[in-house]
């Protein structure tokens, strides 16, 4: 941000901790001192510094030298007093929900910005709710859905995947329960997940296809350079999605719709460059974990629309 006029030049995401003093040299990582810049979103936290690391029971000074026995006893007692149970207080349900969010975030491999946005939405809803939240785990799942929808193509996670990962973590969360809670949440607070568009899934679908060994082998056998084929497929998929109006898409699953568009685009670029097609419905199904009959059904609808402005796709 410009110090004179206030113009925002760029946005940077920084870690919520800060290391005081110079970085230490040598193999003494415990000599570093970290402080929290504020109340971190993704955990039940407090302001101020921390005594050592989370499970430290042996303490050193800023130079990495061991403290005296008397000081060791004193800091161990202080660290115990400032333990998780004391800091949590009456926020145990919130603590468990945020701990689940951290576990789920690692399994889904979403970035820290999506995780922190989920935690922010969760805390906002909890604070604005008139009554007590009955199911914090279900609420954090809905907030995660809202966060990934906000980040669009940067977090192409489906509703089914969110429900599956919560169930794998041992929580009774399913798609129907998430949708029901999202509708209830909208009526109470006005917050609701945005509708996901097929375009948001294009980077993920292309990545899944290009990371399949069978697809790579067929691309090379057709005389393509991998990067050239990937770029052509991505551009054509976006072009195909633009051809199909929202009225034709109906209530179709956007992820499956994108996979079907990629399959149709492969056939179009094969005609355009006079080469054999790379994808089959079975291969696209294997690479993206989408049912083959779903691709066939979506492609049947797409074919009629595309044929209006393109040559017939056989």
Image (spheres, grey):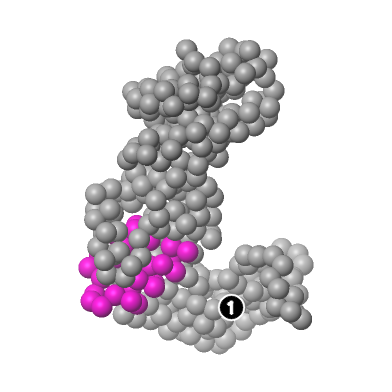
Against 299, is 2 above or below?
Answer: below
Question: Would you say residue 214 is visible in this rendering?
Answer: no
Quadrant where the N terminus lies? bottom right
Q: Is residue 131 magenta?
A: yes
Say how many tags the image has. 1
Which type of secondary structure does the marked residue at label 1 adopt? Answer: loop
The extreme front residue here reads 308
Residue picked out by circle 1: 37
Magenta-colored span:
117-143
94 vs 59, left or right, is left
Against 115, is 91 above or below?
Answer: below
Identify which residue, 302 or 196, lies in the foreground.
302
* Crowdedness near tag 1: few (<14), some (14–19) or many (≥20) residues, C-alpha within 10 Å: some
Q: Is residue 44 magenta?
A: no
Rendering coords of residue 143 (x, y %): 38, 61
Against 94, is 169 above or below?
Answer: above
Identify which residue, 29 or 14, lies in the foreground.
14
268 vs 187, left or right, is right
Rendering coords of residue 76 (x, y %): 49, 81
What secondary structure predominates along the stretch shown in magenta?
helix
Rendering coords of residue 161 (x, y %): 38, 44
Which residue: 63% across, 12% down? 274
Rendering coords of residue 168 (x, y %): 33, 47
Which residue: 30% across, 64% down? 186
Which of the 4 image quadrants contains residue 145? bottom left
């Amino acid at each position: 941000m410009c110090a004179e006029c206030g113009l925002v030049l760029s946005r940077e995401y920084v870690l919520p901790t800060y290391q005081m003093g110079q970085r230490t040299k040598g193999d003494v990582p415990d000599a570093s001192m970290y402080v929290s810049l504020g109340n971190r979103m993704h955990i039940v936290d407090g302001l101020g510094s921390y005594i050592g690391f989370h499970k430290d029971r042996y303490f050193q000074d800023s130079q990495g030298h061991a403290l005296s026995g008397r000081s060791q006893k004193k800091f161990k007692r202080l660290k115990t007093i400032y333990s998780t149970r004391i800091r949590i207080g009456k926020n145990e349900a919130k603590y468990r929900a945020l701990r689940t969010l951290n576990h789920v975030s690692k399994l889904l491999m979403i970035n820290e910005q999506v995780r922190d946005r989920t935690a922010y939405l969760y805390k906002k809803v909890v604070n604005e709710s008139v009554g007590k939240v009955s199911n914090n785990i279900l609420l954090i799942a809905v907030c995660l859905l809202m966060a990934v929808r906000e980040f669009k193509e940067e977090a192409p996670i489906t509703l089914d995947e969110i429900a599956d990962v919560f169930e794998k973590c041992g929580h009774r969360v399913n798609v129907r329960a998430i949708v029901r809670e999202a509708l209830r949440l909208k009526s109470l607070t006005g917050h609701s997940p945005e509708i996901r568009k097929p375009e948001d899934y294009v980077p993920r679908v292309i990545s899944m296809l290009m990371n399949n060994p069978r697809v790579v082998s067929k691309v090379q056998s057709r005389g393509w350079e991998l990067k050239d084929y990937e770029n052509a497929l991505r551009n054509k998929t976006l072009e195909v999605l633009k051809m199909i109006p929202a009225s034709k898409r109906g209530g179709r699953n956007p992820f499956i719709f994108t996979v079907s568009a990629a399959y149709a685009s492969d056939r179009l670029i094969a005609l355009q460059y006079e080469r054999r097609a790379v994808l089959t419905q079975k291969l696209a199904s294997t690479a993206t974990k989408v049912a083959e009959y779903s691709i066939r059904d979506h492609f049947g609808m797409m074919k009629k629309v595309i044929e209006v402005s393109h040559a017939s796709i056989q």
